[in-house]
Image: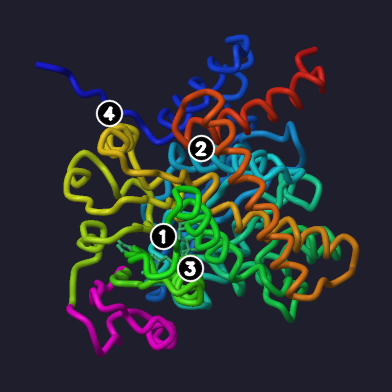
Amino acid sequence: MEQVILRSSFEEVNDQVARAGSLLGLHPGIIDVLTSCEREAVIAIPMYDDEGNIEVLSGYRVQHSSARGPRKGGIRFHQTVNLDETRALASLMTWKTALVDVPFGGAKGGVAVDASKLSPRRKEQIIRRWTRSLVEMLGQNRDIPAPDLGTDAQTMAWFLDEYQRLEGFQPACVTGKPLELFGAPGREEATGRGVAGITRAALEHDGRSAKGARVAIQGFGNVGRFAARTFSELGMKVVAIADVTGGIVDQAGLDVLELISYPDLSYAPTGDRIGSTDVLEIDCDVLIPAALGGVITDANVDRLRCEYLIEAANHPTTSTADASLRKRGITIVPDILANSGGVLGSYFEWTQNIQEFRWPLQRFRDELDARMAIAFATTVETADHYGVDLRTAAFVVSVKRVAEAFTLRGTLA
Ligand code: NAD
């Protein structure tokens, strides 16, 4: 019987890096460098819970690479956060920032805690404590956090305030901030807008029109909501959406603008109810996982009924599920390309903070659309050149850039 070897998230990302490295003919020692993390911090966050008991949460910051610039990556508050996943997500940030050619490296952080059960006060205490514990590693030229699952603009405002108390005024120390506190118009929508733009590009590349294409979305937070809004602006039909409370489906098309007005989908009055994971198996043209990682696995891959899988979430597809989808002819646009609008938007915010100069929204959108179009075209050209899938191609582009920067620095001495 064939033995199935389960790979951890970090190992799965490293398999991609190694594959790209060998296509590029990189020295095995360089591949070893690119599959290691520069620095990892694990911290204890002792807290009083709402009943006055002491509990100790685990917090993380992993810095994967600074070869191309200061490390960049979100802070996640979720009960599943752990060191291996944080390493994988930090590494993905390195490849994402290289793919869209912004002067950053990669990092990721988080706290293992159920954000949905936190009062605003507890959330504030946790992010302030996280910031104090890690302050030496952070800063606009060292490592710049941003929101991720379970954190938002308010969380980044608390981070900014705590950082300023310790290190002085430095608005570029974090991105994804509120507009009233050095945020950039356009950043909040950037990831979702980018996901929709890449979806359109993928359809049009195959000679298909985005108009009328049927989309199903898992996740209705920052990414899912803005993606849904942009899909409906493009004339696409959103036929199913789910969040942690469950989902709704209507093959005639859901009223996205109405749904966006609700805090979560349990308030949705119309459409047939489905479960949070059923949405992945809905008959559609385009499937958008925009919630957790690891949701498309050997257990459900055969039940997917889409033609395009656009990875808005980070690392939603295991490598064996990826292989089986490709065998069925399903086009997969990988996370490091599909959701790179977020880090591009963060780069624009960081740039504006450093220059103390605010761009108009239209300039932000135009720069975002143009740079994502370049990243898509470069990935497609590379896929054609090497005869590989889009994920492998995206890694080839980014691994080449990071390996070149690392080698030019001569940091082996
Ligand atoms: P968010 O916290 O704003 O929203 C998460 C959404 O997922 C919520 O609607 C929540 O209800 C839903 N969800 C959680 N658990 C679920 C489950 N078990 N089943 C179905 N739905 C579930 O987070 P976000 O910022 O929108 O991030 C979503 C994904 O996109 C994450 O993987 C994140 O790493 C990735 N991402 C985010 C950004 C960004 O700019 N926010 C950028 C790049 C990638």
Mark 1–mark 2 distance (CA, rounded to whole Å): 20 Å
Residue segment shown in magenta:
244-272
Q: Where is mark 3, residue-wise? A: 227
Q: Nearer the viewer, mark 4 or mark 2?
A: 4
Mark 4–mark 3 distance (CA, rounded to whole Å): 32 Å
User: Is residue 283 highlighted in magenta?
Assistant: no
Q: Where is mark 2, residue-wise? A: 87
Q: Quadrant of the C terminus?
A: top right
Mark 1–mark 3 distance (CA, rounded to whole Å): 9 Å
Q: Residue 403 location, x and y as percent?
A: 68, 23
Q: Nearer the viewer, mark 1 or mark 2?
A: 1
Q: Amino acid at mark 1?
A: Ala
Q: Is mark 1 within 8 Å of ligand 1?
A: yes
**Element marked by disc 4:** loop
Q: Where is mark 1, residue-wise? A: 290
The answer to whether the residues at label 1 and label 2 have Cβ atoms under 8 Å apart is no
Q: Amino acid at mark 2?
A: Arg
Q: Quadrant of the N terminus?
A: top left
